[in-house]
Image (tube, rainbow, N blue to C red):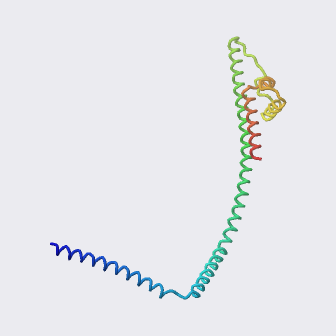
Amino acid sequence: MIESLSIEFWIAILFFLNFFLVIFSFFIVRKMNRINTREPEHQIVSESEEKSEYVSDSARKIISMLEPLVEESQKAAISFDKQVKEKKRLLKELNDALDSRVISINLLLSRADALQKKIQAEHKEAMESFVFPVKNNLLPPSNPVLDQQNQIIQMYLNKTDIDTIARQLAIPKGEVQLVIDLKNKFLAMEKDNR
């Protein structure tokens, strides 16, 4: 048993020695190959010069190919910017026109509601007394809506309060408030766009 262990022991040691010798010889052969395949230093310099020339030529070609693309993209960006500015201007004009029409529609609706209430009140009064009076003041005022808007705004700018404006122009207080609020909104939008 002692003899078998000693043989196995020596076999293992020989195996490790052979393994290390193979690895060592592999590294030596590799090192020798590197030394033998090395080129003289002046050839390495000339190759690096050739490579740098090749790289710079390639870079010049790429730059010359990209220059027209950059110029075209700059032109497209300028054109796009002009179009965006034009569209903003058109949108502002459309928005102003729409806001003006919304004010007019709201004023007309308020006036129609006020007239309807007035007619209903007079109808109820007439039904109670069985007399149907004919009044000429049931028709809407002869001033256009835009003139009334301008009157409201002018009175407001002259520091007249909303109740007084509504009473003097004979229109609902909510309608006066609506016109003033929308005018303030337009002024704020104009300041933001500048």
Seen in the picture, residue 170 relative to 33 is either above or below; the reply is above
- Residue 38 versus residue 178: which sits nearer the camera? 38
- Residue 80 versus residue 152: which sits nearer the camera? 80
- Give residue 24's position: percent from left, percent from top: 38, 80
Tell me: 160 left or right of 1. Answer: right
- Give residue 88's position: percent from left, percent from top: 72, 50
Q: For the point 26% across and 75% down, which residue is it? A: 12
Q: Quadrant of the N terminus?
A: bottom left
Tell me: 1 left or right of 80. Answer: left
Q: Residue furthest top?
A: 129
Q: Residue furthest right?
A: 158
- Residue 92 versus residue 142: which sits nearer the camera? 92
Q: For the point 71% across and 35% down, which residue is it? A: 105
Q: How many marks?
A: 0
Using the rendered view, name the quadrant where residue 63 is placed. Answer: bottom right
- Give residue 121's position: percent from left, percent from top: 70, 18
Q: For the point 34% across and 78% down, which residue is it? A: 20
Seen in the picture, residue 168 relative to 57 is either above or below; the reply is above
- Residue 20 versus residue 123: which sits nearer the camera? 20
Using the rendered view, name the quadrant where residue 116 is placed. Answer: top right
Q: Residue furthest front?
A: 2
- Give residue 51's position: percent from left, percent from top: 59, 81
Using the rendered view, name the quadrant where residue 67 is placed. Answer: bottom right
